[in-house]
Image: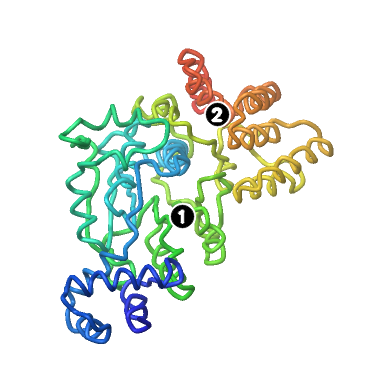
Amino acid sequence: MHQIEHLLRRTMGLDAASIGSSLISQTVRSRMQHCGLTKLEDYTRFLHETPAELSALVEAVVVKETWFFRDKEPFTVLVRLVLSEWVTTHPDGTLRLLSIPCSTGEEPYSMAMALLDGGLPADRFQVDAVDISSHALESAQCALYRKNSFRGQTRDYRERHFQPFEDGYLLNQSVRGQIRFQKGNILDGDCLDGSGIYDYIFCRNLLIYFDPPTQEKVLQKLGRLLKKSGVLFVGPVELTLVASQGFASVRIPMAAACRKVASLPEPQAQGSRRHRKPASKSLSPRSVSPLAKSNSRPALPPASATKSSPSTSLKQPPGTELENAARLADEGRLAEAVQLCENHIQIHGATAQAYYLLGLVRDAEGNETLAADFYRKALYLDPNHYDTLMQMATLSEKKGDANGARLLHKRAQRVLEKA
C-alpha cells in the first residue's frame, strides 16, 4: 500500500495522512475488485502500466464534499471587495476569477450567483473553474443538483437561479454562462499556463490534503496566478499556513482571505480616480441586498484598503489593540478580540472603529441584538462610517425591515459618492 500512497502523492500531491491510510486502502480494494485483481502487487503494477486506472483511482479518492455557498462569508466578502475596490478602479474591463479545485461546480456557480445578485453585470466578469476529476466536471457542466447541494437555512438564491427539474434543480443558463470549466492538475507545470492572472482566486480546503513541500509548490503557483492587488480565499484552517508562504491575512473574520505580501495597487489608467463612481447604477452598494439576506457573518475591512475607505474613521487609532483584535477575530478567538477592544476603549476612549469591531464580533457570534447596539454607538460617533452602515443594512434586511435597509444603503452610497 505504501507504493500506491507514494504514487498518489506524486500524481496529485495527496498526503495519505490527511484522509487516512485506511480510507485509501478501502478505495484501493474496491478498485481491485472492479478490475478483477486479488493481489495488491498485481494492482500496483497495473496502476503503473495503465494511465486510465490511475485516473480512476484518483477519481475515487478525490474529496467531492461541497455545496452551494459553503461558508457564506467568503462569497459575501467577495462581493463587497469587488464593489468597493475593483469596480471603483476598473470602469472598464473584465473581472477575472478562478475556482480551483471546483469539484462539481457548486463553488464557482456560487461565486457567479453572488456577483450577479450583487449587481455586477454578466459581461463584466468571468470565472475559470478547474478540477482534476473528469466526473466532477461532467456533473458541474450538467448543472443539475439534488438536495444535498442545498444546505443552510437560507436558500432564496435557489428561487432566483434554479428551475425544478425531475427530482432536482437545474441551474439557469444566465449563471452557467459565466463559468468556463476545464480539467487540470494544479501540480502540473503547464496547468493554467496562458490563462493570464486573476483578480480573485478561491482555493479552499485543498492545501490540507498536501504535504508541506507540495503546499509550498501550490502556493507559489497561486501567487503567480494572482494579481498584485488580488485576494486569495483559502479554507479557515489553511490561513496560518498561507500566512507563512508569502501571503498576509486581510483580517476579515470567517472569510480566510489574504493578499500577497507587499502587494502594490494595480496601475490605473491615465486620468482615472481612486474613488470613481461606478459607471452603472446597478453597481451601487444597494444592489448587494439579495446576498446580504443570506445569514452571512460580517466582514472586517481589508487592511490594505483602509487608506481608501470612504470614511476616514476606518483608519486604525493609535496603538495596536484594534489591529490585534481584528487578527484574533479572524482566527476565531472572539472572546480575546472583545477584551482587546474593551481595553482600547478604556485607554484611548470611545471610537467608531472600536465599536464597529465589537459589533462585528457579536454579529459573528450570532448575537444580532448586541451587535446592533454596538453599530449604533459607532454611527453615533461617526454617522458616515461606511462599513457600519453596510452591516446595519444587512441586519435590517435579515429582520425583514426592507425600508430601513434601503435607507441605510442610500446613506452608505452617499458616503461613497463624497469620498
Q: Quadrant of the C terminus?
A: top right
Mark 2 or mark 1: which comes first in sequence?
A: 1
Q: Is residue 220 above or below residue 168?
A: below
Q: Residue furthest front?
A: 38
- Provide the secondary structure element on which disc 1 rests: loop
Q: Is residue 290 above or below residue 170?
A: above
Q: Residue at x 64, y 26 (%)?
A: 375
- Classify residue 369 as left or right of residue 48: right
Q: Nearer the viewer, residue 208 or 36?
A: 36
Q: Residue furthest top?
A: 403
Q: Residue at x 44, y 34 (%)?
A: 276
Disc 1 marks a residue whose amino acid type is Val
Q: Quadrant of residue 183?
A: bottom left
The picture places residue 19, in percent across and down from the top left corner, at 42, 66
Residue identified by numbered label 1: 234
The picture places residue 53, in percent across and down from the top left corner, at 19, 74
Q: Residue furthest right?
A: 347
Q: Residue at x 45, y 43 (%)?
A: 71
Whether residue 224 is visible here, answered yes or no, is yes
Q: Nearer the viewer, residue 201 or 155?
A: 155
Disc 2 marks a residue whose amino acid type is Gln
Residue identified by numbered label 2: 391
Circle 1 residues within 10 Å: few <14, some 14–19, many ≥20: many
Q: CA distance from mark 2 to mark 1?
A: 23 Å
Q: Is residue 412 above or below residue 247?
A: above
Q: Is residue 404 above or below residue 97?
A: above
Q: Residue at x 44, y 40 (%)?
A: 72
